[in-house]
Image (spheres, coloured by chain):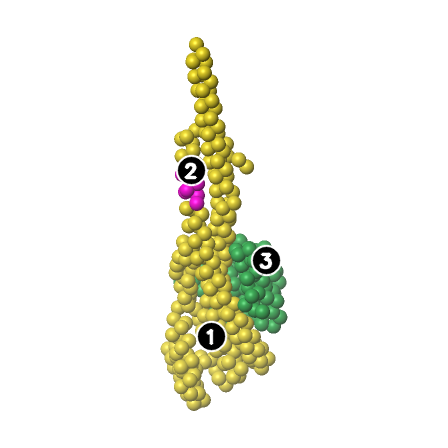
Chain colours: A yellow, B green
Amino acid sequence: MELRVSATRQELTRLKNRVRMAARGHRLLKDKRDQLMKEFMAIVHENQRLRKELERRLSAAYRSFAQARALLSPPVLEEALMASSGPEEVSISYRRIMNVVVPEMDIRGAGEEGEERTEGAALGAMPEAAPGASQRGAPGESRKRAVNLGIPPYGLASTSSDLDDAIKEFQGILPLLVKLSEVERKIQLLADEIERTRRRVNALEYILIPELEAAVKSVEMRLEEMDRANASRLMKVKDIVRAH
Amino acid sequence: MSKVAVLGQRDAVLGFKASGAVAFAADDAREAREKLGKILEDDFAVLLVTEEMAEMLKEELRPLYEKPKPVVTILPDARRPRGLGMELLKKRVERAVGANILLKGEE
């Protein structure tokens, strides 16, 4: 499509300014797109890594959980699951990547707690009698203490070790899942932004800038043509004047 | 402070109760929609959906991808992985980049 402009010198300067402006915008957007792409690729690769790990760990967790479920009666299982942890809290903060607001999620205290848990487990298996004793204290207190010591807060006599494994697996998975969610959301937001930026880059590169340049050219040609017409008219007039 | 929700079949989400997520069990599409409504009323940061559920609730989940909260993530199904989450990701990457660049790393 051709831009319709009047062929005047003023219009020509205006057009030239617009071309300059568009070229600058194009360059900036292209840089933005490249940078976004770089960030995007890093996140995509992280996502792939996370998903693979998650798939592996999740299937392990399901496996031990299925074993536990086969051995335990549903009410006992339900009770053990309820007791093993309250809902974890997730805090969200926001960060900007190239002016795209992305969420960063953090599971409250899960990192430290998880470490403590594994630490407790690494300290060596607690003597089997100890958990029973701590379970009889004040319920809230003892639960917290028990969790800190790596002792499950449910009756050990009525549950199997498969359940312990399963619960430990699932507890380890949640932070991973939250991370995965964060990464996937980032990917989605960045993908949208990249698409938008790409469209704008392409629109500038293939439509607006060529159109403007074509307009500049046609105005320049019209002006030159007018100059030539003027010159020849002047010569003609001169001839006529001289003939008198 | 927000929490994490899990939506899926009863046996799939039960284990997540132990992990500190709030589990919502649903066995058919109607129940799943009901539970989804409940989840949206509350303040959840993350919504994990099993692959099966995600397929069942495709239409209902679509508007959620645009919202800041909750972030919907499709869980890889441990028993019958269909790679729905990966599929979705691939589509997004393709749309953004204009080509499938994910295959490169795998082969």
Label 2 belongs to which residue? A16
Q: Secondary structure at mark 1?
A: helix
Residue B87 is left or right of residue A172, and the answer is right
Magenta segment? A16-23
Q: Whole-Å distance between the Cαs marked 2 and 1?
A: 61 Å
Report x, y in % for residue A136.
41, 83
Q: Residue at x 45, y 73 (%)?
A: A85
Report x, y in % for residue A23.
43, 45
The answer to whether mark 2 and mark 1 are in CB contact below 8 A is: no
The chain carrying label 2 is A
Classify mark 2: residues with Cα within 10 Å, few (<14), some (14-19) or many (20+): some
Label 1 belongs to which residue? A172
Q: Is residue A48 visible?
A: yes
Q: Residue at x 42, y 60 (%)?
A: A103
Question: In this orientation, which residue lies closer to the viewer: B6 or A105?
Answer: A105
Q: Say what amino acid the circle numbered 2 marks.
A: Lys
Point out the frontmost of discs 2 and 3: 2
Counting the numbered discs, the total is 3
Q: Secondary structure at mark 3?
A: helix
Residue A8, placed above or below residue B36: above
Classify mark 3: residues with Cα within 10 Å, few (<14), some (14-19) or many (20+): few
SS assignment for the magenta stretch, majority: helix
Label 3 belongs to which residue? B58
Q: Whole-Å distance between the Cαs marked 2 and 3?
A: 50 Å
| Quadrant in which the C terminus of chain A is drawn | top left
Q: Quadrant of residue B103?
A: bottom right
